[in-house]
Amino acid sequence: MDVTPILDKLNDAQRQAVTAAAEPTLVIAGAGSGKTRVLVHRAAWLIDVEGISPQSLLAVTFTNKAAAEMRGRIESLLNVPVQHLWIGTFHGLAHRMLRRHWREAGLPQNFQIIDADDQLRLIKRLLKNLEIDDSRWVPKEIQWFINAQKDEGLRPQHLDDENDPNRRQMISFYQSYEEICQRGGLVDFAELLLRAHELLRDNGELLQHYRRRFQHLLVDEFQDTNAIQYAWLRLLAGDTGVPFVVGDDDQSIYRWRGARVEHIQRFQKDFPGTRIIKLEQNYRSTATILNAANALIANNHSRMGKNLWTEESVGETIKVYSAYNERDEADFVIGRLRDWIAQGNARADAAVLYRSNAQSRVLEEGLINARIPYRVYGGLRFFERAEIKDALAYLRLISNRDDDSAFERVVNKPTRGIGARTVEMMRSYTRANACSMWRAAGTIASGDLNGRAANAVNAFMSLIERMARETRGLSLHDQVDHVIRVSTLLDFFKKDKGEKGETRVENLLELVSAAKSFEPDPAEEMAPLDEFLSHAALEAGEGQADAWEDCVQLMTMHSAKGLEFPLVFMCGMEEGLFPHQRSIADPDGLEEERRLCYVGITRAKQTLYISYAEQRRLHGVDNYAQPSRFIAEIPDECIEEIRPRVQVSRPLRSPSPMRRKNRSVAPGNELGIHLGQRVRHSKFGDGVILNCEGQGAHARVEVNFETAGTKWLVLSYANLDLM
DNA sequence: TACTATTTAATTTTT
DNA sequence: TTAAATAGTA
């Protein structure tokens, strides 16, 4: 066996990991150290060299993108299509198991997956149903509570109310929510994982089967696993399975949604004799960028400890720009982008990163003005669009009449005279008889309702029945096509004047083509429609179309994880924004923010710009912030401050507010400000100080300019020259 | 039932 | 500021 193609071009640590013996292995893979490469080559090694059957391999990732990439790379490395390799996301694989063993899992065969939005609607409906004031019980918080419990593997009956009435109520909501889901055959994202865990835990034979089958478990982004994912893996590994997990404790940025870095420590305890391999050579960034990242992250206490190094040259210094405000910051970024593009670089090689989505706005405005094409990551994905979800809801009802989530979504869309009153009646019937909306509708229509409402309900029910009948036996895309027409959804949106309605129609037609190109997996013995619906929930599709065009990339630091760009901007590096206000007080939260910053820095290959605004308009009010502490945590020698706008011969403030320990900008009298003082402003020209007020960063002066009239200026931004 | 006015809250997000 | 959700009105 020629192992050259598999081991070639791997460094020592990587090779050790790839060829590790069949024992529990923990690979700590720093940013840009070839993590995916190790995972892929490990799989190839096991199959090609160790002769392990592809069948006995299970590879888990967090995102569909990562799963697709791994599959593709394994296939191309092995040069044979590996059919039925179990590579997928935690949710995808859990789903697969549940489909195969729906009976054992206690689910109906055609159970459907609901996304976060469906889940929230369901909870809102539940509150209405229980006639509970949703200002006191916020649906979002209930959703959060339920998911958090599920992430920890806890069912309502496991929860203790701790004599807290608030908690008792939450648990009761959780309980009712579960009943509705069970009745409608609905499974939310967290439920997929929890059920899959229970499935194995409670079915000895199944567990034995899968343990025997999956000898090798490869896990990507291990630091992001939550309790239930970890429990599932551990169960699956048993005493005989060989877990090979890859992760980076310094890049753990999802604690807030249940991820537990502690699993890295826990793993070593749970699997005694774990081999630890650290990948510390970085192939991505310049030495300067790495030094900055290393120094920054060294401020965190709970770390495994690792130091990235590179053979790369020192490279450019990191440029720090101090902007007046967010517009100035955007102008700066755009100026640099212009240069970058003018030098013949690809726009797509530049990324602008920020902490929170709201920051993209100013940047976008600037980019539009500058006519620079850009793409914002995040936002609504294809299968999340309202019109698409409407169409899917019809399809779900066709598959299962008891799907209340789908029922409520489309019962009166397009409007067909089934108003709030009628729906309310169905709800109360539902509650009294513990049945689905569909059954309630049937009963009520032939009883309690007045003629007009009853007709409307009957019309709706026969519409669904008719579509179910007429689509039977049709190909998937004909089914979809039929449903959007017969349901009159398409006409409904066609009537919608303006661009909005147009795109909606286009999207619905696009759904038909999506159905056309969807290839059901013959191995999944399920109805193509159900498979398509699951696919839609599990893989919501691309955020935005035309990803082809060469565009500057705008995204949050979170969504930048796993990506790399030659040119990176990190914007809004201010206390309160990054680290975010809501994390500052909590030491763990702060450390997570620092890791996020570490992730941001390590995205850059060659050039990194960091910028902050001294004044930023947030929620309509001007805020003054200090530069982020993270900037100060980067060694001076890595950084170069650039402030092209400053041409002061004698600055009113110290030249580097960012570096100063005591940061209160102190203008005031010691700097020679007094009424009648003559000053010069770069834009407004010469003038005389008429008035002073405020202190520190907020100190302002009123200046009567000879040509520009009187103006109030904030001293720390105005850069006045004393004359 | 649809449109308009008012209120409210505003990290991060994949599945 | 602004976007979304809700309440109120035609």
Image (cartoon, coloured by chain):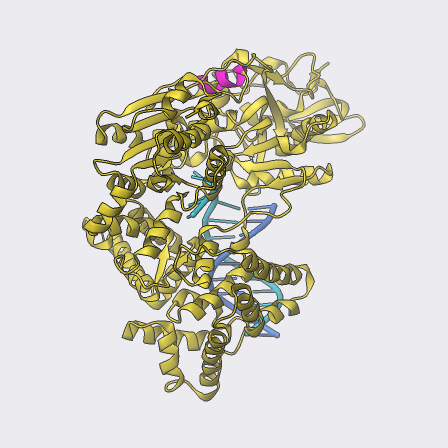
Chain colours: A yellow, B cyan, C blue
Total numbered labels: 0
Was residue A314 drawn as part of the magenta stretch in this picture? no
Was residue A289 drawn as part of the magenta stretch in this picture? yes
Query: Whole-percent x and y of residue A96?
Result: 36, 52
Query: Whole-percent x and y of residue A180?
Result: 32, 64
Q: Which of A575 and A61 is in front in this view?
A: A61
Q: Quadrant of residue A499?
A: bottom right
Determine the residue located farthest toward the right in the rendered image.
Answer: A707
Q: Residue at x 66, y 61 (%)?
A: A502
Q: Which of A456 and A486 is in front in this view?
A: A486
- Magenta residues span A287-295
Q: In this view, does A715 lie above or below A415?
A: above
Q: Quadrant of the C terminus of chain A?
A: top right
Query: Whole-percent x and y of residue A11?
Result: 44, 18
Q: In this view, does A723 lie to the left or right of A202?
A: right
Q: In this view, does A693 lie to the left or right of A264?
A: right
Q: Is residue A591 above or below residue A129?
A: above
Q: Which residue is drawn at 38% across and 34% down?
A: A47
